[in-house]
Each structure stands twice: as C-alpha cells, then as structure tokens.
Image (tube, rainbow, N blue to C red):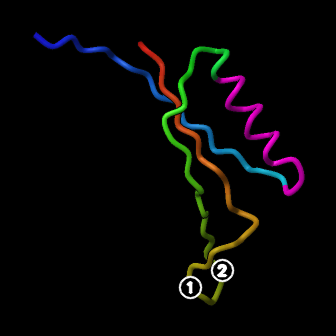
Amino acid sequence: MAITTKLHYKVIDLKLGEQGWGTQLEDTINQQAQDGWELVTVFEHQHEAQQVGSGTVHLPALVTVALIFKEPA
C-alpha cells in the first residue's frame, strides 16, 4: 500500500538586479528554506509585451527568474 503525502507549492517570480543578483537569489532560497520550503526548480521567465503597430516582442527588462518551492501540506 502506497503512502501519499500532500504537498503545497509556491512560485516566486524574482526580478534580479544587475548587481548582486547571486546574493539576491541565494537570500531568497535561504529564506524559503528557513521557512520550511524545499526548492524544486528554477527557470528564466521571459515576459513579452505588445507594442502598438507591431507584433509581440521580447523586452530584456522583463526577464525574471521563477523559483518553485514545495512543502508538506
């Protein structure tokens, strides 16, 4: 018989500054770990914007890092 564990998930969409991005990322991960959250995955999220009179374009200023955490329910 398998034992099932219910989990809660949390997503943090973090905009990293050009300077100190490593520290900012580490601080966020460490704080979540102290609060009982386990890091599942991280990925870059490239936001897009619609400009008047043109198609959808990627704007470098709208790049964030999405961190996904889990904890037992």
Q: Is residue 26 rendered magenta in the image?
A: yes
Q: Amino acid at mark 2?
A: Gln
Q: Position of residue 37 (x, y in %)?
A: 56, 21
Residue drawn at x 67%, y 15% as measured from the top left = 34
Residue drawn at x 70%, y 62% as measured from the top left = 62
Give the residue pinned by disc 2: 51
Nearer to me, 52 or 73: 73
Nearer to me, 65 or 62: 65
| The quadrant where residue 22 appears | top right
Q: In the drawing, does residue 70 fall left or right of residue 26?
A: left
From the image, give the main secondary structure of the stretch colored magenta: helix
Residue drawn at x 80%, y 40% as measured from the top left = 24
Give the residue pinned by disc 1: 55
Mark 1 residue crowding within 10 angstroms, few (<14) / some (14–19) / many (20+): few
Dividing the image into 4 quarters, which one contains the N terminus?
Answer: top left
Residue sticking out furthest to the right: 19
* Bounds of the magenta segment: 18-32
Q: Is residue 23 above or below residue 39?
A: below
Q: Is residue 31 above or below residue 68?
A: above
Tell me how far mark 1 sits from mark 2, CA to CA: 7 Å
Mark 2 residue crowding within 10 angstroms, few (<14) / some (14–19) / many (20+): few
Q: Position of residue 13 (x, y in %)?
A: 63, 44
